[in-house]
């Protein structure tokens, strides 16, 4: 049995041997080995049974007239350490009394994106949204991708786009019911302009290595020796300056100083090597 990967460092799902992954308890199933010399009958194969924790549950409700009312499919996530047991949504549909699907959620296994679609009674799309789910147990999520609303006749009503951070980006638009454009804003253009202004102001700030260390909170005559230490203190100094925590309009000026201080210290460490 080769253990070279273990001796060299980190294990890799595709490069490490099966034995190594089993010893590390990455693989918790037995390796399937079958002799085909005498043929193979799939009906007699009990060597690879499914685990119970992969089982899906579907709940169904019906209107009084027998039409579908509510369908929901989910997977039960077992408690793990301090994490409680939870239902991991996979698909959920809501139907009106006539049987028309009005709301449709889809959260495919193995990917973090949950889509939601809302429909009019005439089955035309009313709105569509996409979420990036950060935690499958708490369903903490943020907006991502394109979000659209539609008029009942089918024309687009609003179109918004969100980046990976859940912030509006690109062109966002609103339309009248006849299709004419009523409002538009290019958020990316605004961000680029503000970014250029911020970097220009930061670049004008001339500070020494000692001043930079003091701005980040290092003690007198204490110059950091590791980039990781600089980044750790930098993140700590940035947290109180976030607009959600600090309404002070001068917080941006203080962040310029902190950002410039980090840059000066990292350049100093790089040149010292």
Image (cartoon, rainbow, N blue to C red):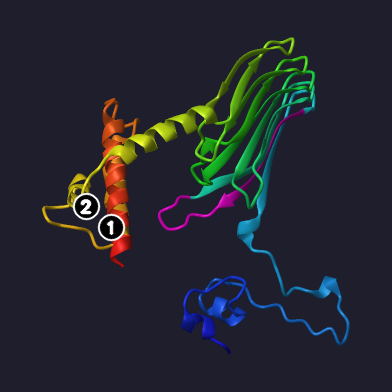
Q: Which residue is mark 1?
A: 268
Q: What secondary structure is marked by label 1?
A: helix
Q: Quadrant of the C terminus?
A: bottom left
Q: Which residues are magenta?
A: 68-84
Point 56% across, 45% down: residue? 87
Point 46% across, 50% down: residue? 84
Indicate whether residue 74 is drawn in magenta.
Answer: yes
Name which of mark 1 and mark 2 comes first in the sequence.
Answer: 2
Residue 151 spot, x, y in % from top left: 72, 15
Q: CA distance from mark 1 to mark 2?
A: 7 Å
221 or 8, which is in the foreground? Answer: 221
Compared to 150, does 198 lie above or below? below
Q: Is residue 135 left or right of residue 115?
A: left
* Quarter of image, res 52: bottom right
Point 46% across, 30% down: residue? 193
* Quarter of image, res 159: top right
Q: What secondary structure is marked by label 2?
A: helix
44 or 172, which is in the foreground? Answer: 172
The image's mark for residue 37 is: none
Residue 207 spot, x, y in % from top left: 22, 45
43 or 239, which is in the foreground? Answer: 239
Q: Which residue is mark 2?
A: 209
> As drawn, which residue projects farthest toward the bottom?
1
Residues tagged 1 and 2 counted as in contact (Cβ below 8 A): yes
């Amino acid at each position: 049995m080769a253990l070279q990967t273990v001796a060299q460092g980190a294990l890799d799902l595709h490069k490490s041997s099966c034995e190594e992954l089993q010893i590390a308890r990455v693989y918790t199933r037995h390796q399937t080995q079958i002799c085909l010399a005498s043929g193979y009958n799939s009906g007699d194969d009990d060597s690879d049974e499914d685990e119970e924790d992969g089982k899906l549950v579907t709940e169904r409700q019906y209107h009084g007239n027998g039409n579908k009312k509510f369908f929901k499919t989910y997977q039960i996530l077992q408690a793990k350490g301090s994490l409680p047991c939870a239902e991991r949504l996979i698909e959920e549909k809501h139907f009106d009394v006539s049987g028309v699907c009005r709301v449709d959620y889809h959260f495919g296994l193995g990917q973090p994106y949950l889509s939601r679609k809302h429909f009019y009674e005439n089955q035309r799309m009313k709105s569509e949204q996409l979420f990036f789910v950060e935690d499958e147990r708490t369903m903490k999520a943020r907006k991502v991708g394109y979000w659209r609303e539609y008029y009942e006749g089918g024309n687009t009503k609003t179109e918004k786009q969100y980046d990976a951070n859940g912030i509006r980006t690109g062109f966002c638009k609103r339309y009248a019911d006849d299709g004419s454009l009523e409002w538009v804003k290019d958020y990316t253009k605004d961000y680029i302009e503000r970014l250029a202004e911020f970097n220009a102001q930061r670049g004008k700030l001339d500070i020494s290595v000692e001043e930079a260390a003091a701005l980040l909170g290092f003690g007198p005559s204490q110059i950091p020796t590791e980039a990781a230490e600089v980044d750790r203190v930098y993140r700590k100094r940035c947290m109180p300056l976030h607009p959600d925590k600090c309404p002070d309009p001068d917080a941006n000026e203080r962040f310029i100083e902190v950002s410039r201080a980090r840059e000066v210290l990292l350049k100093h460490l790089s040149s010292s090597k």
